[in-house]
Amino acid sequence: MAVYEYKAIIKTTGKTTKGVIDADTPAQARRKLREMELYPTTLQVSKEAGITAVTSGKTGSVMGRRRRGRVSTRDVALMTRQFSVLLHAGMPLVEALGALLDQTSRPRLQAAIYEIRDKVNSGSTLGDAMAEHPRIFSALYINMVRAGEASGALEGVLMRLADVLERQAKLKSQMISTMAYPAFMGVFAFGVIIFLMMVIVPRITKIFQKQKAELPVITETMIKISNFVGHYWIFLIIAVFLLYGLWRFWVSREEGRRRWDRIKLRIPIYGNLHLKLVCARFTRTLGTMLQSGLTMLPALEVVNTVLENKHIQDHMDDVKAGVRRGRDLAVPLKETGLFPPMMIHMVELGQRSGEIEDMMMKVADTYDDDVRVTIDAMVALVEPLIIIVMGIFIGFLVLAILLPILTMSTNIRGH
């Protein structure tokens, strides 16, 4: 059974609508839509790897195109919580997946649920069916679902997953909203500087050049900078994009990404923030996996896929090797020299007390709070820094303009 995305006209109101529907053939899909009092104008078969378009009765294959639409972490979190509630209410798995379709508004997510439902109905496990949609469901998500299926506590695992995803979405939203204002100030300040150098300064300097008087060094410097920006601005833009492209190429390579991730940890202030984010992700993922019934080694395998720092991931191989030899987790973590002492002590305490899962979640909450505090401190530092830079530039500009004016005024009085 295929999944079709459609656009149709509602018979009763004449308005247009869109959605997804499952059917064996395009003809059956149109028949179903007409039974729903919808007249399809566009119909297309939707698959994760490509799209087979069927428009106005003509079928054509457009393979290789990615499905349009975006599924955010918040969308997946909401779907996961609804899924858990349906299963907790006693609804069978396939029926719960069918009920999710009516509660999901994202076409891409709807299409994925259709395909997952069909796979499960054909005998596949839920985890294996979700694994075919890696752009929507992460390695953490899939492994937790598999653990929930194996332990028979899928609804509880899904509820914990929803909590994790909602916390991730909330933290990301807070970071974006916090950084939005200083980012706007930075862009605005840069725009003002460019405008002054390309428009205002050249007009003022023409007056000085007509006087053919000797200009102060600061004014000469300002004129040279203004002329350079005015004549070569297109090359400056090309150079910026070229450098960005070279950087992207470098970090796309294995060794380049490893070195860049090592550099990130050494950048003042940001390196500390990045390490806290990694620690929060590490502890929350590990704690959640252990709560879901996974043993330590499989849990560490999943944790390694979500750290998003190649340098730390390389050291995690040594951590896994140490745990495999029977050592306590805190010992190889300490030997890496990367993780903060507080995290090491909490891991050690959790292992001694036999409550490492709860201890990991507490550590993750602590680091999430630290991340928010660090971001607030960075913003508090960036805002006055931007103002200081603007003040220095404006002061430089005022001096460069006023000094020759004062010199010319003095010469006029002398004559």
Image: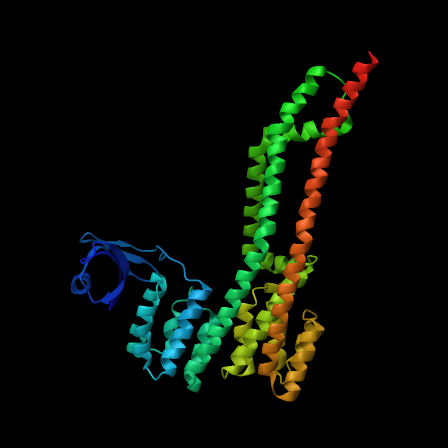
Q: Where is residue 93 drawn, in percent x and y?
A: 33, 80
Q: Residue at x 63, y 65 (%)?
A: 371
* Residue 295 position in % (x across, y down): 53, 83
Location of residue 225 (image quadrant): top right
Q: Is any part of residue 317 visible from this angle?
A: no
| Vertical side of 386 occupied by 402: above or below | above
Q: Position of residue 385 (x, y in %)?
A: 69, 48
Q: Is residue 142 left or right of residue 261?
A: left
**Number of marks in the rendered image:** 0
Residue 268's quadrant in the figure? bottom right
Camera sees residue 284: yes
Q: Measured along the vertical axis of the image, is residue 58 above or below residue 219?
A: below
Quadrant assignment for the C terminus: top right
Tell which residue pokes out farthest to the top in this image. Answer: 415
Q: Residue at x 67, y 19 (%)?
A: 207
Q: Residue at x 58, y 82 (%)?
A: 358
Which residue is more in the foreground, 105 or 122? 105
**Apparent side of residue 5 relative to residue 195 in the rendered image (left or right):** left
Task: Please name the colour scheme applied to the rendered image.
Answer: rainbow
Position of residue 386 measured from the top left corner of the image (x, y, whole percent): 67, 46
